[in-house]
Amino acid sequence: MKKTLQLLAGFWSVLWGVANAETGSGTGVGWGALNLPAGVTPDSHDIHDLHMTILWICVGIGILVYGILVYSLIHHRKSKGVVPATFHENTKLEIVWTIIPFLILIAMAIPATKVMIKVYDTSASDMTIKVTGYQWKWRYTYLDEGIDFFSSLDAKSNEARQLGSKIDPATVEHYLLNVDKPLVIPANKKIRILLTAADVLHAWWVPEFGWKKDAIPGFITDGWIKVEKPGIYRGQCAELCGRDHGFMPIVVVVKTEDEYKQWVAAEKAKQEVGKVDASKPLTLDELTAKGKEVYASNCAACHGAEGDGVPGVFPAIKGSKVALGPLADHLKLVLHGKAAMPAFKDQLNDVEIAAVVTYQRNGFGNKKGDSIQPADIQAYK
Amino acid sequence: MSVATHDDIHAHDHHDHGPAKGFMRWVTTTNHKDIGTLYLITGLIMFFVGGAMALVIRAELFEPGLQYVDPHFFNQMTTLHALIMVFGAVMPAFAGLANWMIPMMIGAPDMALPRMNNWSFWLLPFAFVMLSSTLFMDGGAAAAGWTLYPPLVLQTGNALPFTVFTVHILGMSSIMAAINIIVTVFNMRAPGMTMMKLPLFVWTWVITAFLLIAVMPVFAGAVTMLLTDKYFGTSFFNAAGGGDPVLYQHLFWFFGHPEVYILILPSFGIISSIIPTFSRKPLFGYASMVYATASIGLLSFIVWAHHQYTVGMPLAGELYFTYATMLIAVPTGVKVFNWLATMWKGAMTFETPMLYAIAFVVLFTMGGFTGLMMSISPADLQYHDTYFIVAHFHYVLVPGAVFALFAATYYWLPKWTGHMYDEKLGKLHFWLTTISVNICFFPQHFVGLAGMPRRIPDYAVQFAEFNAMSSVGAFVFGFSQLIFAYVIYKAIKGGEKATSEVWEGAEAHGLEWHLPSPPPYHSWTEAPDQSLISELH
């Protein structure tokens, strides 16, 4: 009942919202989520303008067509005693209604062509970022800075989105639109985005930036953005990419140039720190605890939280020949992947690989009893 | 000699005639009406199966969070819902109408190739049983969307070869049906029934049949390449082996775009039959209707990559496909204007078939508008793969193709059964369906524009309100269809006797209205009088 009332209450705001669609400044929420955002890049403004133009043209034609139809439905009915006319053609009229739409189309095609040429012009960019789609996360590689990291759904959304989690999504901030580590870019710089994928097709889309483009394994596509104002912009994968397609959001933090430079320096310092602890030996408990975390965010989506897998598609870890077999085979599979299994050598560091492999060999009742050290991974590599 | 033989057969026919009894009648039948009925019933059953899947989807999307199904199963539902609705509900239903109506409309006794007709139908039940059985296989059914894009579809488990084989069988069935229709129309028209006298429904089906023959083999080829990529080590769609995943998309949409016109052209034919009857006027612009349909058919072959504006085609490719796609608006507009002009100054009445035909014109035009918006490639960089697209193609397929099928059923049901259907229930079905279909699909325009991607089982909370509304509409729509099934059942069982004309003045609108209701087992055993044909509008 409450839902019904909400629905009815919403109707009015919809009508109100449509009437004001032109002034709508961006992605609304609830009943206000009605129209394309006007965007924060030159392309997105142009595309929004094109969209509004063609929308109003359609509204105009619609009023004409539906107006004639409604007039006819009211006046030309048998119950009013109308005697039907017998005409069945009119060459002049037919030529007119063929030519006029054609002219409208030409008028639309000209601005569309201009915008498309601009969207495709990725030349003279200030910096380049490579975006790689994985099942189901994004990897961002700053080709000029040497910064490289993965970005996946944040822990809170991930917990709430599990089947039967009993967590109300409304209580999670930016539910399904938040990540553990966002892409950070400077404002007012022309940034060329190169897109590719590691496994299946994905598509990178932030509505406020005006376009989406497919990420295709083995090929590189590109696009460009020049964001006018600092802020946080959110988007999602837009090409069906398997089970967790709905759970690989995109978050872009746009900073002023100075703030961006500070961020780059901090990132580089962090990467140095990350390299050191790979040489320290860890206990079995430390490894399995860490491994459990790594497993949950990297393996559980396919192989199941309990290591049961999905029969016929994703093999079980529990009692698996690989997890109970020689270490070299296990590492080969994890590091280099096979068919639908991604290669994790670039996604996880040596500590994480050692931990997750140890966890897989000792968890789920496997009890192999060996603890794999980061040094073993280095040796294997 | 030949005359004598003919008479012998004829005498034999009259003596030992009519359908066999019981179950075997339906298995062995070569009669166009029996086969038409089988097709129509199959279409209706699959409409409910595909609809049940749609309700699983809408139940999960009623509110944010995952409540009922695993995302992998959700993806199987979206994939099978589409495959079943396209190949199981709409296409067989149109084939059923073609079987029933074309011989009656052109003055022929039956279809030209009756045994092939039997075979083309009986392939279908096996295909759909096989497709449905994939749900129970290890790894579940295909979950990569009805487009079956690689590399994702290659992650399907044991279901992949069965899905591919289903496509092969459905393709064979469609091609045989298409051949049969072309041969029938080209060879079995009654004397005086020239091509430019054919009812629009026959014309649109002939053009559809050519599209089917041209594109089904392309689809069969593309899915076979999937099969060899997965099991025989080829690399058609694998970059690591020199292939290209986008090649599949070009092949698929070279089939897929004509395919969507295969789903809509016969609807145009149906609407062009119904509107003149209930406006008590001849169809406006018959010749331009035929030429518009033919141009839409031709254009459908050269616009396919507008489904792929985001794959990174060269700029020239984007622009070419933009211009070519925009052109489709011209002949489609001509059709809509012709329907309006047909109603203009008519003496309209609003029986259920006419109500559905009017709703078709209004709502299909809505889908046409969004289609025009999407043809603008830069704007489609935003629209692509969002709920805006979902809204668009459901507007052209549900209040488009499906409404045309409802209209056709109500229009010809009295002819088929000899009984008038229950007009009150028909109108109830119409209003419930039309209101709920808009509650279901209209809000999807909004969430799509506001940024909700398609094919996701869960969504950000700002889309909650419109999704809830959409789900309510979907459930009302789904359950309203039980009324439709009941109306058909009731008309088969009995009811007011229908005259041969059924609708006031219908005799001027087609030869089928000169046959008794229900028509004899063999439609026109003797060619209709030429004067009948020349008096048709």
Image (cartoon, coloured by chain):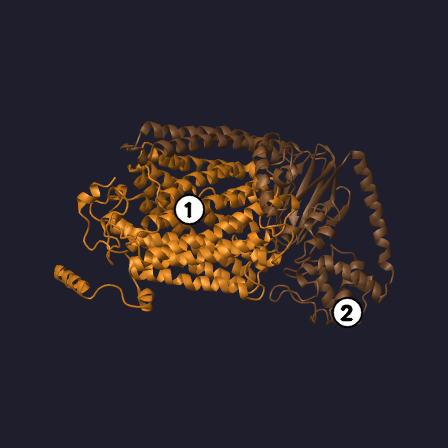
Chain colours: A brown, B orange
Is B427 in front, or is A370?
Answer: B427
Looking at the rendered structure, the secondary structure element under dot 1 is helix
Is B97 in front, or is B242?
Answer: B97
Looking at the rendered structure, the secondary structure element under dot 2 is helix
> In this view of the protein, can residue B446 be seen by the observer?
yes
Residue located beneath label 1 in the image? B430
Q: In this view, does B497 lie to the left or right of B435?
A: left
Which numbered marker is on residue B493? none
Query: Separation of disc 1 and disc 2 at Cα?
Result: 62 Å
Q: Position of residue A314 (x, y in %)?
A: 64, 64
Q: Which chain carries label 2?
A: A
Question: Alpha-carbon neighbours of circle 1 within 10 Å: few (<14), some, or many (≥20)?
Answer: many
Q: Is residue B423 left or right of residue A301?
A: left
Q: Is residue B39 left or right of residue A212?
A: left
Residue at the (33%, 43%) spot, across then down = B274
Is B381 in front, or is A25?
Answer: A25
**Quadrant showing the C terminus of chain A:** bottom right
Residue located beneath label 2 in the image? A362
Q: In which quarter of the image is residue B66?
A: bottom right
Residue at the (61%, 64%) spot, across then down = A313
Question: Alpha-carbon neighbours of circle 2 within 10 Å: few (<14), some, or many (≥20)?
Answer: many
Q: Quadrant of residue B231?
A: bottom right
Q: Where is residue B179 in the image (x, y as percent from the top left)?
A: 34, 54
Q: Is residue B487 above or below residue A8?
A: below
> In this view of the protein, can residue B261 be seen by the observer?
no
